[in-house]
Structure formats: structure tokens, C-alpha cells
Amino acid sequence: MTAVRPRTKLIVPLTQTTVPAMRVAMHAADQAGADMVECRLDHLDSPSPADLAELLTDTPLPAIVTLRPVRQGGRYEGDEPRRLALLAAAAEAGGDYVDVEDDVPAADRPAGKIVLSHHDFARRPADLDAVLQRIDDPAAAVPKVAFASAGPEDAVAALDALRRLSRPGIALAMGEPGVMSRLLAGKFGAFGTFAALEAGAESAPGQPTIADFRDLYRWDAIGPDTAVYGVIGCPLAHSMSPAVHNRAFETAGVDAVYVPLRVEPGAEHFNRFLDAVRGADWLGVRGLSVTIPHKENALARADEVDELSRRIGAVNTLQVRPDGSLRGWNTDYAGATDALCEAMGIARDGLAGRSVAVLGAGGAARAIVAAMAHYGAEVIIYNRTVSRGQKLAGEFGAAARGLDALAAMSAEIVINCTSLGMHPNVEATPVPAEALAGVSVVFDTVYNPLQTRLLREAAEAGCRTVSGVDMFVNQAAAQFEPWTGKPAPRELMRQVVLDRLSRRNQE
Ligand code: NAP
């Protein structure tokens, strides 16, 4: 199926300091598939009228010309009459659009097509309604508002602004929490959104690269009916979930996109965003992944949760049902259990009566201990901090020891839920190699590297091995399938994870 290209333009801002460099970048933007460029004259060393003809004659792409003053977050420090004269000259020299800030009196604005803009680098304006009215001036070609975001609810406000403007405009919540406002601009028929030519070339915080828009966030496939999914957490910079789910949507032919939603720690931040989602059915949010530090907050907000997830005390998946209510479940336990059972060739019930050593007593261990106990396994927890292990064991009818007791361990299944052996400390391992003799299956939840020292020594000792990547893919599939009603493309998801890990390790 050929995707219909959204009308919304990908605009690459050019922030070079000389005209020749800006011209080179203009052609690079064209090559990269941009629809338009924004020439940020305020980044030029000392912009003059003579520069404008050189810059704006025979451009490969339509250009917006901007000379942002310091008072609206730009770099231009000169006087206002000179600034306005330069903008007027830019329009005459061939600039397709001229960006003019909304505090410039109408009588002083240059002739030509105007992007009438308002910026707030501190917060979402308290008087956003008044700002929208001001920039939605019929004399201007494109209304634009951009404001700093404190949470993804500010992105919801920016997307709502797009719906309320009388014609295609630009509305952006700047910064990492607001990135959804950029990624979904096409869904809401924006005039355009800004995309950096490459990492490090952003003109405002939170701007994804043009390659990320296209290759990671499905820019060309997003339309008005596209369903929205995302991952709530903090931090999110290394999350592999957007890459995994977006590729899976594409392969399975699902009209959906998956975006990062950075929410600061604290239930109040989590609830503020969920309230915004619940009040915005037009946004089309259908499901959310939830990661650290919000899994407990998600449990508290879910209207329906299965018994085991409730006992774990954390959910990492929410489904937004048509009536707006939330179903929550935990796919960490499901992902781990299924990865283990697949490797052993048994159903979950087949775990009953087997002896399992769980190493660790943190969040991952908690989900796995609960699942193992639920399916009737005999669990012994080994943890560095023995009291923490004892507390967890007490909740799920398990036993607890210190890590030093591992030398004398005897278990059929060993599951590492500590971070020992994780990149870059790849020579660390929680279990002495000698203790692995007689163990049938060793499962390491650590997924970077793919083969940890523990798994390598387990394979040498003749054990079957299960990697953290198997768990990660299974937990993502246990989100994808109920969300979409389609089988998850597990092999592809696995390949995406492996590619990301190898790229990350090369950085
Ligand atoms: P967590 O809540 O912070 O727990 C960390 C656990 O590791 C604790 O039991 C801690 O022991 C132990 N630990 C940390 N450093 C140690 C050291 N130097 N020596 C001995 N023990 C040490 O973390 P988590 O969320 O449970 O994550 C744990 C691991 O699970 C991570 O490595 C992560 O990669 C993996 N994981 C994998 C997936 C997946 O999909 N594959 C999903 C979730 C997590 P103390 O109690 O003594 O501090």
C-alpha cells in the first residue's frame, strides 16, 4: 500500500553562520527529503541586504526567512527598524515566507506572506487562547505558536491549538516532554513542523532529525485516523520501544504511531498527563507503555487490572478503551514467563513444582518471583541486600538468601534479575561458573550484551539459555497483540532490538 504523503511540511531550520554554509545546508535538506527550509538569519555572523540575494536566489526548496530577536528567544541583538528592513528586503529577494513576531505592530510588518509567530521559552502561555486569537490574523499566511513544555500535556495543548486555528498553522511544545506535538503535526493538518538536518543541528529543544521523523516515527504514514500509542517514563532517551512498536505497526499494516512521552517522576505529573489524555478523545490515544518511575502510578489509575499484575504492584501497559476507561496489565512477568517456557518447550502450568533461583529483589525480580510463585514453582531469592530479598520472599511464599549462598545453590532454573554483567561491566557475573553444573536452564534478564558472561558460562556448562532480548520482545508482543488484535511480528521486533543494541554499543 502506498502511503499518502501528508500535506504537512517538514521544515529544516538552517542555523549556519555564513551564507555559503547555509546554501550548502539548503541543498542537503533537499537531498534529505525536506519540503521547506527556514533560514535563521539571526544565526548569520552579521546579516546584510547583500547576503539576502545570494541566499535566496534559486533556492532548491521554498524558504521561510526568520530574524529572531533576543526578546523572542533568537540571537538578533540589533535595533528593530534595521531588523524589519532586513525582513522586508528578504521578502523582496525571494523569501517565500517571512516570520514576524506577534508583538510587531501590523503597520510595521513587511509585505508578502507572513508567518505570524509567538514564542515562550519558559512555559505554556497562561493566556494561550488570547495568543491564538492574535496569531490567527487573516492578514497573515501562517499562524505559529511555540512554547516550552513541562510535560506531554503541553503537547496535547499544542495539538489542540492546531485544531482551533482557522487554517493550517504551526503549534509546538518545545523540549523533550513536548515532542509528540512535533511528531503528530501531520495528523492534525499543521502547515508544517521543524526537523533538524542532523543531530546537533536543532534550532529549538526537542526537535527530532528528519531521518527520525521518517524512519523512526512513520511521518509519511501518519494521517487523520492514525491511532496514537506511546511510552511514558523518565528518562526515555535510550528506550527501544518506539523503534520496536513503530516497525511492528508498519509490518503488520496497522495505522498507528508510537511516540515517547517524558513524564517527570511523581504521581502528580503522571496524573496530569493522563487527565489530559482522558479529556482529549480527538487525540486518538489507544494504548500506553509505562516504564520507570511510573509503573505503580499506572496501577493506581487503571480501572481494570488482572489479579497477578495487582499482586506485583505495577503495570507497564495501559489500553484506553472506547469509553475512556483504562485496562492495565504487566507484560514484564508475561514476557519473562513466556521466554522461559518457550525455551523449555512447556506451557506456563508446566512450571509447577520446579525449583527456581531468582537473583535480585528489584522491580524485575518482583514481577518474575510473583509469576513463578503464581504458576507453582519453588522459588529461592538470592540478593545482595538480604533483608530486601527476605521482604520480597515473604510476600510470595519464597525463601531468601544472600548472593554468597549461590556457590552452594541447587536449582533447575536460574534467573538473573540483577544488573550484574550489563554493559559496560560485561565481565561481571552473579553466579560462579562451578555452581552452574546441574542447572537445566539459565535465563539472564540483562539484554545488553545479548550474550552475557553468565549465559556464555551457562552454555559451556551445558545449560539451555534464555536472553533478556527474548524477554524484551515477548513483553513488547504482549502489549502489541491486545492493542492491535494482530499477531506481533516477533522476529522483526527482535531484529530491531539487536540493531539498536549494536548501534548503541558503537556510539
Ligand atoms: P532494580 O529495581 O534497581 O534492582 C536491581 C537489582 O540488582 C537489585 O536486586 C540489586 O540488589 C541488584 N544489584 C545491583 N547492582 C548490584 C551489584 N553490583 N551486585 C549485586 N547485586 C546488584 O532494577 P530492575 O528494574 O529490577 O532491573 C534489574 C535488571 O533487569 C536490569 O539489569 C535490567 O536490564 C533487567 N531488565 C530486563 C528487562 C527485559 O525486558 N529484558 C526488563 C526489566 C529489567 P540490592 O537489592 O542489593 O540493591
Image (spheres, rainbow, N blue to C red):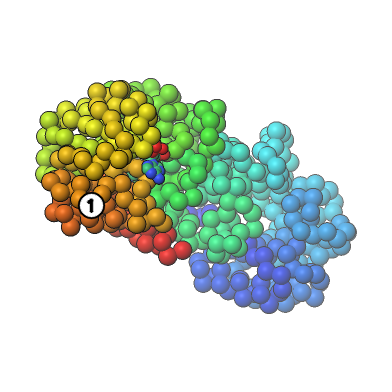
What residue sits 77% from the left and 69% below the top?
A: 45
Rendering coords of residue 203 (x, y %): 64, 58
Residue 279, visible in the rendered structure: no
What residue does disc 1 label? 433
Give the structural element (helix, strand or loop) at label 1.
helix
What residue sits 30% from the left and 22% below the top?
A: 394
Rendering coords of residue 70 (x, y %): 79, 54
Does any atom of ligand 1 lie closer than 8 Å to the CB of label 1?
Answer: no
| In-front residue for pair 95/179 | 179
Rendering coords of residue 87 (x, y %): 78, 62
Is residue 130 shown left or right of residue 243?
right
Displayed-image quarter of ligand 1? top left
Determine whether 278 is above or below 30 in the image: above
Is residue 6 shown left or right of residue 496?
right
Determine whether 43 is above or below 70 in the image: below
Determine whether 498 is above or below 52 in the image: above
